[in-house]
Amino acid sequence: MEKGDAELNAAASKIHCENICKTFIQKNTQKVHVLEGIDLDVRENEFLVLLGPGQSGKSTLLRILAGLETPSSGSVLLNNETPQGPGPDRAMVFQTYSLFPWRTVRGNVEMGPKFKGMPKKERRELADHYIKLVGLDGFQDAFPHQLSGGMKQRVGIARAYVNIPEVLLLDEPFGQLDAQTRYLMEQEVVRIWEQDKRTVLFVTNNIDEAIYVGDRIVTLKGKLPGTMDAVYPVDLPRPREHADLKFLELRRRITDATELTL
């Protein structure tokens, strides 16, 4: 770990992962070891980044935290309790947009509260609040095919927030966007988080993005099974500038440490 960064006590953590291992069995009965020995603590309302190349197990770890996968061994605690599968206390935003094409922006955002049985007036007010928060006020009645990629991902973020989760899990949410839109969305996701705090775990393979959005960066090695490599506190004020000397120095340290795998 970067070395000198003390790990949190499990009782003080929002999320505590201990010795998480994951093995998949393929159709030919071959075993694929994806994660090995992951020990991780995440603070309340922390913006933590999981940084690593493809095939490092970071998305699998996120799916375990979401309850979409179960670890082969090890344990996960959320608020000192073992979560049983997916739950409303966690929401996930994927790289693919996964919007209902026949529903408007408002219709997509309010689906969660609708399934929970929230009255129409209340869920519409809640949906409109988060649509405004993500910068889509005025687009409530637009359909997904009328939106840009960045706008679609804003809908996904609003849809996650509207369920009032304690933990927000973002799996390379800007991976499909062009460079300029990606940078704008990095700014937006930080702005949204600062206005409506949640515990966030954000997966990326982009070092600049990790430094820009994160409170801490956890790097994973690039060979399977994925293992934790180091933890880097990001002691930089927000908003951050990519040309800032401290930003560039942290980027150099992470790049040098991961040059064989990133």
Image (spheres, rainbow, N blue to C red):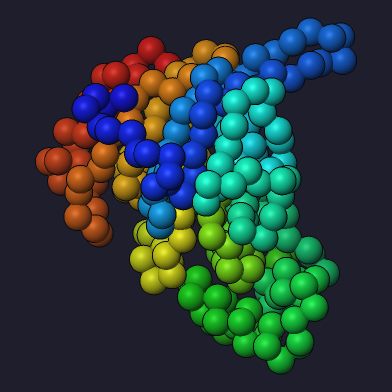
The residue lying toward the viewer, choosing from 68 and 15, is 15
| Residue 145 shows in the view | yes
Q: Quadrant of residue 50?
A: top left
Up the image or down, 60 lies above or below 211; here it is above
In percent of width and height, residue 144 lies at 71, 66
Percent coordinates x, y for residue 219 in the rendering = 40, 28
Lateral position of residue 110 relative to residue 126, left or right:
right
Q: Toward the viewer: 7 or 114?
A: 7
At horizontal 24% and vertical 53% (from top left) the residue drawn is: 240
Q: Is residue 119 left or right of residue 73?
A: right
User: In the rendered image, is residue 49 in sight?
Assistant: no
Image mark count:
0
Q: Is residue 10 above or below residue 91?
A: above
- Name the outermost residue toward the left: 245
Q: Quadrant of the C terminus?
A: top left
At 76% from the left and 87% from the top, the residue drawn is 119
Q: Is residue 204 above or below residue 79?
A: above
Location of residue 259 in the rendering, given as x and y in whole percent from the top left corner: 34, 17
Q: Quadrant of residue 23?
A: top right
The part of the image, by quadrant, that contains residue 247 is top left
Q: Residue at x 71, y 91 (%)?
A: 121
- Name above or below for residue 53 compared with residue 246: above
Q: Give the position of the N terminus as an image quadrant.
A: top left
Most extreme residue toward the bottom is 121
Q: Position of residue 250 (x, y in %)?
A: 21, 34
